[in-house]
Amino acid sequence: MATRTPSWHAAAIVIATAVIVAVTAGSQGIVRGATATAARAAQTSEGKRSVQNGVYTEDQAKRGGVVYRRCLLCHLDTGEGDANIGAPPVAGEEFLKNWSTRTLKELFDTMSTSMPQDNPGGLTPKQYVDVMSYLLQMSKFPAGKEALPTDTAQLDRIIIENPRDSR
């Protein structure tokens, strides 16, 4: 003969399970935030900095926006790209999912060896950096007072970070 569990007992089990799930999810967020904070501290001690610290100027982004007009057909005005034609996102949340923790040098190298599609490497280093500045602006990273350099050794010390990873 089967015994019935009192309804209060079943409710207590459901509540306890919900609390465990909530605490676990919360602690994972804390761990993720602590990991991101530790990573930033390590980068700073290595002379690295984040795109969240204003690594380009408004003027660079403005010039980059003019050059980016050539990119609109494939990457669209929002930078979200077009998967139907193989154009990846170059700004916004999807871009950050793919590029978070990578350096601006990696982005520069990718852009300068593959874009524009009809003439890879056809822009000057300054134009590529200006376009990168515009993409950072589209991704809501703040502008700063110093221009983003064209020197790849310096770009290698600037990390792309998703602001959501540091919460």
Image: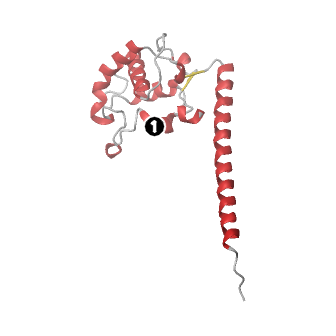
Q: Residue 136: x and y, percent?
A: 44, 25
Residue identified by numbered label 1: 93
Q: Say left or right for 149 vs 82.
A: right
Camera-side residue: 158 or 2? 2
Relative to the observer, which residue lies in front, 117 or 39? 39
**Residue at x 48% of width, y 35% of height:** 96
> Residue 38, percent across and down?
69, 30
Report the label total: 1
Q: Nearer the viewer, residue 88 or 31?
A: 31
Look at the image and tell me whether residue 72 can be seen: yes
Q: Position of residue 117 (x, y in %)?
A: 32, 32
> Which image quadrant: the C terminus?
top right
* Badge 1 density bin: few <14, some 14–19, many ≥20, Cα 10 Å: some
- Horizontal placement of 40 versus 151: left or right? right
Residue 162 visible? The answer is: no
Vertically, is 75 above or below 47? Answer: below
Q: Which quadrant holds the N terminus?
A: bottom right
Looking at the image, is 16 positioned above or below residue 160?
below
Question: Which residue sits at x=69%, y=64%?
Answer: 12
Dot 1: element: helix
Give the residue type that dot 1 points to.
Glu
- Identify which residue is drawn at 56% across, 22% down: 156
Identify the image quadrant of residue 165. Answer: top right
| Residue 16, picture quadrant | bottom right
Q: Position of residue 135 (x, y in %)?
A: 40, 26
What residue sits 64% from the left and 35% below the top?
Answer: 33
Q: Which residue is farthest bottom?
A: 1
